[in-house]
Image (tube, rainbow, N blue to C red):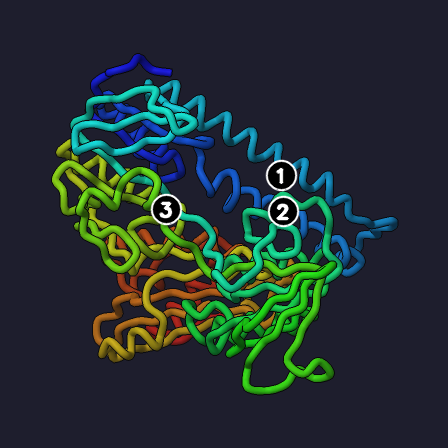
Amino acid sequence: MPVSNSAFDLAIIGGGPAGYVAAIKAAQSGLKTALIEKEKVGGTCLHRGCIPAKALLYSAELYRKFTNAREYGISASGLNIDYPQIHRRKEYVVKRLFQGVQSLLKKNGVDVFSAEGRIISNQEVSIVSDSIETNRIKVKNVILATGSAPFIPKNIPYDKKYVLTSDDILLREEIPKSMIIAGGGAVGIEFACLFNALGTKVSVLEFLGNILPSEDREISEALEKLLIRRGINILSKTSLEKVVVENGITIEINNGKDIVGNKGFLSADLLLLAVGRRPLLDDPGIKELALDFDGKYLQTNEVMETSQSGMYAIGDITGPPLLAHKAINEGILSVTHLTGKDMHITNRKNIPRVVYGFPQVASIGLTQKEAEEMGYKVKIGKFPFAANSMAIIEGESLDCFVKIVSEEKYGEVLGVHAIGPHVGEWMWGVSLNSVLEGTVQEISNAIFPHPTLSEALFEAAHSIVDKPIHN
């Protein structure tokens, strides 16, 4: 541990994607930097979220493809699932990336405190281990990056055995025969796809009118049809009223109609709570600082500075979207500001979103409904993956498409929405187009390699400018 009573240019509380990236960027900029993390650097994303979940999803997708191997001219006899091995591989991936983050922090000269950070004032931070202060450091600036945790409704008997959060289910080494997922957002849908591919009987409850309620309605409806076709039971406009735990779970639901044969009750091996996340703002003494809040989140200006000069907040504690890449961007932005360098201010409406199901859903910007409600006169361009050569080659074209929402007069790209194979991989290009204030005309003028999945975006742009080529 670094020397007691040290003086730092910057102290960062929280070592997730927001915090550790900010620490590296600050150290690279010549600031003496302290990073304080009470668990493991890498945070939820690396240890209990993005990375382990995607590792499991990748294995499930491979299994799903092998079950259809005969269609591709491949015989795969004796196919089975070794779920403990899938977990061991997941742990290997996490460990390797964790060691990489540790190495980067050390390489860049960041002082890492494996403890809890408590703010005494704008210029002083207490280092606490096992409720005992072990150190106190002087600081010139503070960045808060304490992250978030799964939200658990108070009326739910959460026991980590039959009722689990996304944190808990990543630790299980058994495939449940049946499960109910409360919440049809990104987390719920990813786990629904994962366990459905592995043979679990899955039901998804969504309180709102459709799954992925933040996405464009056409995309959500297309995905719902695909998932139902695969055997996932989706109950929208459904609330979770009561949970009884006894060698499994039985839930009482309310959706204005009886469930055939069960009269409003469903049973399964376990219940996964995927009903959102809450910002972690209690532990480090944040609420005693008289900072401004926007609802339950800390309020910041466009460069991530709070209402107190020299104190910044980044990541999940600043509000949605609660995404690792948004947190990383905010970490870089805050450090760029406090070092006095030129910066680009990110429009939060232009942060890409990806749901890593089968197929993927990816989007950026406004949905058609949002654009119309804001008064835009929109022009829509769509192109189906059923007419995309690479999607047909990969056998992943069914009901998938790309949709561009543009402003009619000048061709400004207001939003791009896609459902299809690997659509998250090329959403960065739409983000770049947004940064450069590009139009749909410029997308149509770009040269896309052939054959690629991304050509669907090219064709969707042409369907607005004139007409698509291959449809």
| Between discs 3 and 1, the one toward the N terminus | 1
Using the numbered discs, state the Cα–Cα distance from disc 3 to disc 1 in whole angstroms: 26 Å
Q: Residue at x 33, y 15 (%)?
A: 2
Do we see residue 390 in this rendering?
no
Q: Please state the horizontal and vertical placement of residue 315, each as a whole percent of the image.
A: 33, 46
Q: Identity of the amino acid at label 3?
A: Leu
Q: Nearer the viewer, mark 3 or mark 1?
A: 3
- Which numbered tag is attached to residue 90? 1
CB atoms of marks 1 and 2 within 8 Å: yes
Find residue 16 and report its image quarter. Answer: top left
Q: Please state the horizontal and vertical placement of residue 244, each as a whole percent of the image.
A: 64, 66
Q: Residue at x 63, y 70 (%)?
A: 251
Of 399 and 23, nearer the camera is: 23
Q: According to the image, label 2 marks what residue? A: 56
Do we see residue 338 in this rendering?
yes
Of 130 and 204, nearer the camera is: 130
Q: Is the residue marked by circle 1 packed among few (<14), some (14-19), or many (20+) residues within 10 Å?
A: many
Q: According to the image, label 3 marks what residue? A: 280
Q: Quadrant of the N terminus?
A: top left
Q: Residue furthest right?
A: 78
Q: Is the residue marked by circle 2 packed among few (<14), some (14-19), or many (20+) residues within 10 Å?
A: some
| Between discs 1 and 2, the one toward the N terminus | 2
Q: Please state the horizontal and vertical placement of residue 172, each as a whole percent of the image.
A: 67, 46
Q: Residue at x 25, y 36 (%)?
A: 143
Using the numbered discs, state the Cα–Cα distance from disc 3 to disc 2 in whole angstroms: 26 Å
Relative vertical location of residue 445 with respect to residue 223 in this rendering, above or below: above
Of 281 and 194, nearer the camera is: 281
Q: Is the residue marked by circle 3 packed among few (<14), some (14-19), or many (20+) residues within 10 Å?
A: some
Q: Identity of the amino acid at label 1?
A: Lys
